């Protein structure tokens, strides 16, 4: 079973074809669709974010977190508020 590196869920929709289950569609987050689908739309962004997530550089990780927040996959940064 495959896991999406962005939303941590199974990116495929499965259908019973009589002899087993077959993956027929990608129903994941936008970055997961870009990474797992056969089309080129969003693939470049998804691969760049994945590369930045796996990089040891703190700047690259910060870039990846920024993009994930834009897609709504990471919570916004907590800020301090005065009561």
Image (cartoon, rainbow, N blue to C red):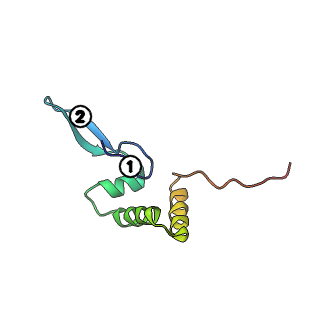
Identify which residue, 74 or 29, lies in the foreground.
74
- Which image quadrant: the N terminus? top left
The residue most toward the left is: 19
The residue most toward the top is: 18
Relative to 37, say whether 27 is above or below.
above
Residue 28's disc is none
User: Could you tell whether 20 is left or right of 61 in the image?
Assistant: left
Q: Position of residue 7 (x, y in %)?
A: 45, 48
Identify which residue, 43 or 48, lies in the foreground.
48
Q: Position of residue 70 (x, y in %)?
A: 54, 59
Q: Quadrant of residue 17?
A: top left
Q: How busy is the neighbourhood of tag 2: few (under 14 within 10 Å), some, or many (20 plus)?
A: few
Q: Earlier in the sequence, mark 1 or mark 2?
A: 1
Cα separation, mark 1 vs mark 2, equals: 19 Å
Q: How busy is the neighbourhood of tag 1: few (under 14 within 10 Å), some, or many (20 plus)?
A: some
Q: Nearer the viewer, mark 1 or mark 2?
A: 1
Q: Which residue is mark 2?
A: 15
* Residue at x 55%, y 52% (from the top left corner): 74
Q: Position of residue 53 (x, y in %)?
A: 46, 61
User: Could you tell whether 17 is left or right of 10 in the image?
Assistant: left
For numbered disc 1, what is the local secondary structure? loop
* Residue at x 37%, y 64% (from the top left corner): 47
User: Could you tell whether 15 is left or right of 73 in the image?
Assistant: left
* Residue at x 55%, y 68% (from the top left corner): 58
Q: Which residue is mark 1?
A: 4
The residue most toward the right is: 83
Q: Position of residue 75 (x, y in %)?
A: 59, 51
Q: Are marks 1 and 2 in contact (CB under 8 Å)?
A: no
User: Could you tell whether 18 is left or right of 64 in the image?
Assistant: left
For numbered disc 2, what is the local secondary structure? strand
* Residue at x 29%, y 64% (from the top left corner): 40
């Amino acid at each position: 079973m495959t896991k999406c590196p962005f939303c941590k869920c199974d990116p495929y929709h499965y259908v019973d074809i009589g002899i087993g289950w077959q993956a027929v569609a990608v129903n994941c987050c936008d970055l997961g669709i870009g990474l797992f689908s056969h089309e080129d739309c969003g693939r470049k962004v998804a691969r760049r974010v994945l590369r930045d997530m796996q990089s040891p550089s703190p700047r690259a990780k910060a870039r990846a977190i920024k993009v994930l927040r834009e897609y709504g996959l990471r919570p916004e940064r907590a800020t301090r508020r005065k009561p």
